[in-house]
Image: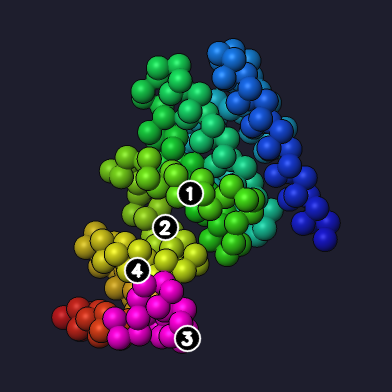
Amino acid sequence: MIERDYIMRMVDMLGKFLARALFLKTSHDYPAAADELATAYKNLLGLDRTVALTLSESQLVTLMGGNGPIAASKCFVLGMLLKEDADLFRVQGNTDHPPILLARALSLLLTAYCAEGNPLHGSHQQSIEDLWTSCEQELLTTSTRGTMFRFYELTGRFDRAEDLLFTLIEQDPTYLLAGLEFYRRLSQRPDNELESGNLPRAEVEESMEELRVMLAN
């Protein structure tokens, strides 16, 4: 209960920081908006904004603590701050920072979602969807794509998960085993869930056999 209260307070404080930063940004007071975000990084995560903007996504995930609900919530907070920072750079005409910051934000939000198996806030899932659409795909690591594959499974979009899975296998054949596990999990679901996810049982079984053949070769 104490842990959950801590997470809820952190997410609530994040919302207030983002609202103030948005107001300042729309008022074209960009220095003040940057200061507001810097304060959020420091107060919520104990992190210097400059450091947050320069570390890689894997370094940032490690810095947030790796595993557990609190670490997941920190990844969510950091992802949302990076997303807002990317937009602040964009409105000021800076075209260098936003793409890489959006890719890192997506990775962090996915890490948080998949760690918990559900959204940490009402905007969590939609933010992931928006970032996946807006990110420059060539900037996304195979690891981020792999977490997006898991996200699609968790949110019941099995057809999208399958499409991404075969792209991943082309990039990294080790995903063959992850794919087999994916289809085994789906095979244990009722027919109505599979059909709702646009991947009927017959297609699940067909794809599973296809991966078995690929793995054997």
Magenta region: 183-203
Q: Which residue is label 4 attached to?
A: 159
Colour approach in the figure:
rainbow
Answer with mark 4 or mark 2, whichever residue precedes in sequence.
2
| CA distance for labels 4 and 1 | 18 Å
Q: Which residue is label 2 attached to?
A: 148
Locate residue 186 relative to residue 120 in the image: left or right: left
Mark seen at residue 128? 1
User: Which corner quadrant of the image does residue 14 belong to?
Assistant: top right
Answer with mark 2 or mark 1, whichever residue precedes in sequence.
1
Dots 2, 1 in contact, CB < 8 A? yes
Check residue 195 for magenta coloring: yes
Secondary structure at badge 3 equals loop
Q: Mark 2 or mark 1: which is in front?
A: 1
Label tally:
4
Dots 4, 1 in contact, CB < 8 A? no
User: Which corner quadrant of the image does residue 43 belong to?
Assistant: top right
